[in-house]
Image (cartoon, rainbow, N blue to C red):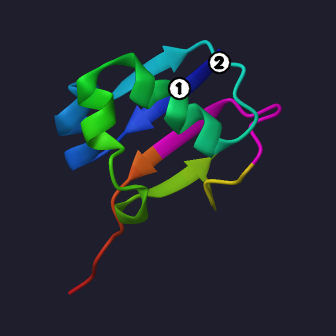
Amino acid sequence: MIDVLYFAWVRERIGLPKEQVATDAATVADLVEELKAREDRYAAAFADTTALRVAVDQTLAGFDAPLAGAREVAFFPPMTGG
């Protein structure tokens, strides 16, 4: 099991702030594909991954990051400052 956290509009589209997911995904990209196949709301949230950032165990990572041993994956839009 891995904790998957959703922030900002990702959370709004999926309707959950966090969930535990049983997965055999090797990478973040594999996990995204599994989630997209679940329901339309996941497919909508992950339709454009270029608009997303990801952190694995609270460290910024790419979608090619391995999930072996990971406990948490978080998805969020890029932050902007002002």
Residue 30, percent from left and from top? 63, 36
Secondary structure under the numbered disc 1 in the rendered image: helix
Q: Residue furthest right?
A: 68
Q: Quadrant of residue 50?
A: bottom left
Identify the main secondary structure in magenta. loop
Q: Nearer the viewer, residue 81 or 33?
A: 33
Would you name the residue on which mark 2 appears? Answer: 23
In primary-sequence order, the first of circles 1 and 2 is 2
Residue 12, percent from left and from top? 17, 37
Whether residue 54 is situated above or below residue 82 in the rendered picture: above
Q: Nearer the viewer, residue 41 or 71?
A: 41
| Label 1 close to label 2 by CB (< 8 Å) | yes
Neighbour tally class for label 1: few under 14, some 14-19, many 20 plus, Cα within 10 Å = some
Q: Which residues are magenta?
A: 66-74
The image quadrant where one finds the C terminus is bottom left
Residue 41, percent from left and from top? 24, 28
Identity of the amino acid at label 2?
Answer: Thr
Q: Quadrant of residue 66?
A: top right
Would you name the residue on which mark 1 appears? Answer: 34
Q: Residue at x 45, y 27 (%)?
A: 35
